[in-house]
Amino acid sequence: MTDQQQPLVKEEKEEKKEAKEKKEEKKDIVEEAVAMTEEEFEAEVKEATEDMKEWQREREQEYLRRVGFEERKREDKVQFIKRIENGIIGRTYNDKYPNGWFWGFRGDNKNPMSDKELKEIEDIQKFYAFRKGKIQMPELPAVRREVTEKAFERKGGVYKVGGHEEPDAWLVQQWANQAGVSTEVREAIPADEQAKATVRAYMGAQFVDATVIHQFTISRELIAFEIVEKMEKDGKKAIEGYDEEGRPILTQEAKYRIYKRFMHFRNFAIRDAISKAARIAQLKILNKEWREEEEIEAEASEVKMVHEEGR
């Protein structure tokens, strides 16, 4: 074998190994699904479907808020109302119409609009265009004013991680609004192996991109570790033994929990990636490092060391 042939053979072996690993992963997921009872599987599908419907409702309602509809909450319903040139229109969500329905009145609010009239209203046409994915979510209106240090005081909307607090996406969005920052989803790719999102944050002529990738293989392993630890902590058996290679053999309950969490995660992975990427981009454009000084110094030292080694 020549020196030129050796790298080719090595690449072929690596490709075969990777293909085998993917095949085994898919097999594991199928086996876990088969291990579920028919009732459990139907319940899982129903729950995932309801989650997707709920997510769609939340997106639609957020769209209505951003295009000028006033939100009014009642005990048994949520209404979004907007005054237009020749009357008033609204969309109501309640138990009878969980996915919402449009209505409208002409002039003095005594003459209801017909379905044909409603379909001709631009706001309603744009709503359905958004639902079909033909137009993007409008940006939040930003109040442009000078950003002061006071705006970055931790007044809520934070969570603890690694022994310190960090601002959540909601709080960062408020800061971005105050600073006149707008965002744009540059890329959102759901795939079999991963969910990838790239978001760009603008402040004037400047912009910063941030990318978040959820690798499903890694995410599935992390979910498995988390569930096994939680079950053991709760006094429930998650591992019933080990195979010849020392790998843990999970109980049926553990497999079911992992499968359920993993499928739920995959359903919302792209949404989560977009949200996280937006938060990162907004913090970058605001030039606000929300980490402990030790973390920043450690990262700077690591970068410096890598550069020195590369000389």
Image (spheres, rainbow, N blue to C red):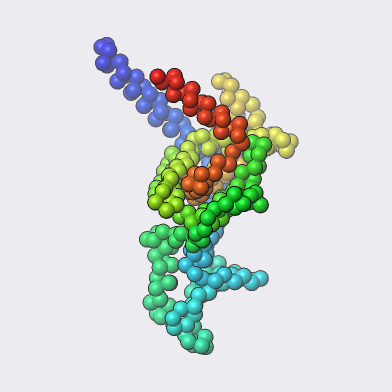
x and y percentages locating residue 221 in the rendered image: 55, 34
Residue at 43% x, 72% y: name it.
Answer: 124
Q: Which residue is drawn at 60% across and 27% down?
A: 248
Up the image or down, 19 lies above or below 8; here it is below
Q: In which quarter of the image is the N terminus?
A: top left
- Write down the quadrant of residue 96 in the picture: bottom right
Q: For this rendering, which residue is in front, 7 or 264?
A: 7
Residue 294: name its quadrant: top right
- Residue 275, how many percent across, how many down? 51, 49
For image coordinates 45% across by 43% down, the residue present is: 210
**Residue 27 vs residue 235, the one in the foreground:** 235
Q: Is residue 15 above or below residue 181?
A: above
Q: Is residue 308 visible?
A: yes
Position of residue 256 relative to residue 4, above or below, is below
Quarter of the image with the C terminus in it: top left
> Is 244 left or right of 112, judged from the image as shown?
right
The reply, left or right, for residue 3 in relation to residue 308 is: left
